[in-house]
Amino acid sequence: MLITHANLITWEDPNRILEDYAVYIENGLIAAIGPSREMETVYPAAEKVDARGQYVMPGSICAHTHFYGAFSRGMAIPGAPPKDFPEILSKLWWPLDKSLTLKDVRYSTLVCLIDAIRHGTTMLIDHHASPNAIDGSLDVIAGAVEQAGLRAVLCYEVTDRNGVDGAKAGIAENVRFIKQRSAIRDRRSGSQNNRVPTSDQQSTIHNPQSTIRAAFGLHASLTLSDASLDACRAAAPEGTGFHIHAAESDVDEWDSLAKSGLRVVDRLHKHGILGPHSILAHAVHIDAREIGLLAETGTWVTHQPRSNMNNAVGVAPVESMMRAGVKVCLGNDGFSNAMWEEWKAAYLVHKLWHRDPRRMSGLDVTRMAVYNNAALAEAFFPETAVGVIRPGAAADLIFVDYQPPTPLSAGNLPWHILFGFHESMVTTSMAAGKVLMKDRQLLTLDEKAIATRARKIATQVWQRYTEQG
Ligand SMILES: [Zn+2]
């Protein structure tokens, strides 16, 4: 496929904006880029997609989300409103996740994937919970992701809150799925045989790789005993990364100190959970020593400002973490898969929190949302660069119909995104070279049919949720 007449935003470092360029895609990868006129001569037989001067850029990456939470939209919480984070868990999320069957998990996931394709998010790192439907739940999610055609990293959250058997089932689901995905990955990379010579514009061509990978999910320090953390560490296959909430609320820190005499990050370090493949979501209440440990161990942190505001848990010390060398990424914690909305929340909330308009510049947001998210994606897809336009990178691309009313350059692009880009401007989305939405028409999922079915299922989920209360 040859995308022509595109204004390319490459998100290389440093970023480039290339006018009237073309992108040649083969086997799910960007094989070459060049001026449209030249490329049309080089690839005369290619199927052409005319971008008509739209911005063509890498799809957004979401570093932490929860597909299982989709049915919470518009759901009433019985009784007095939750007054703090522990009550938000006990009154909303825990009875909700217990209400999910495997069928509900599938539709909850599909609803989120439609939202992602529409809003230009082409890769998501999910953290799943359905305590009454654990076994096989990651296969159900993977099936939906494959049907949608997106790129994802999946895990199941192990927790003690559903008893010993619940924790064991969670561990088993992670291990089963991790082994399954690495077997698929080995099989596909073993079949790679069509290498072609490389040049400036022509990259090595691979067979399409699986777009789904696995991590080992843990809920949070506050719902995991030392024995459970050790059991997870022992069960996790070599090289596995963990994905866990950490210090989202100060309650997590106090609980950890009471349980172990250690702060959360120290406690996770003691149990072998940190490392260059592990993700800690939130890290709102960590102290200077914990920041140092995260930097030393190369552990990833994800920032979810919309969720932090909604739960009123505080604002993570993102700038301090990045200054200390911690790799901070941007997620959405189950909010809309419209990542520029998360950019805007990050840009604004740090200014208000610190009462200083110099805080969290557009460049800091870009560091998280673009470069660090792309680096995190590569930790899970090491054979393919993701989140950048260059030969050899994954063809995960979106078209944005944006008419800048002021000059737009590689240098001021972050502020155009923060003040001018909207996800409704995304007209076309593709992942691994497959077009998922073209001119705002979804090609892989039937939005109306899924929404109709999801509304019926949501009514049943809400009923079960209310009965639990
Ligand atoms: Zn979360």
Image (spheres, rainbow, N blue to C red):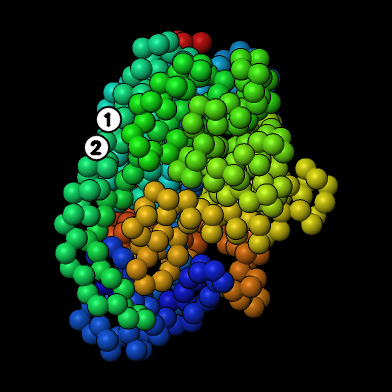
Find residue 282 and report its horizontal and vertical position in percent.
Answer: 60, 37
Q: Where is residue 42? Give x, y as percent.
A: 27, 86
Q: Amino acid at mark 2?
A: Gln
Q: Residue at x 51, y 56 (%)?
A: 423
* Residue 393 higher or lower than 77, as above or below: below
Quarter holding the N terminus? bottom left
Label 2 close to label 1 by CB (< 8 Å): yes
Structural crowding at the residue carrying mark 1, measured as other residues with C-alpha within 10 Å and reported as few (<14), some (14–19) or many (≥20) = some
Q: Number of callouts in the render?
A: 2
Mark 2 surroundings: few (<14), some (14-19) or many (≥20) residues within 10 A: some
Q: Residue at x 49, y 79 (%)?
A: 18
Given residues 394 and 150, the one toward you in this image is 394
Would you say the beta carbon of the disc 2 residue lies within 8 angstroms of ligand 1?
A: no
Residue beneath label 1, please?
Answer: 176
Left or right of 421, for residue 436:
left
Q: Is residue 323 above or below residue 466?
A: below
Secondary structure of the residue carrying numbered label 1: helix
The residue that label 2 is drawn on is 180
Q: Residue at x 45, y 18 (%)?
A: 228
Of all residues shown, which one is farthest toward the right?
355
Q: Which amino acid is tagged 1? A: Arg
Of helix, strand and loop, which one carries label 2? Answer: helix
Q: Nearer the viewer, residue 382 or 331?
A: 382
- C-alpha span from label 2 to label 1: 6 Å
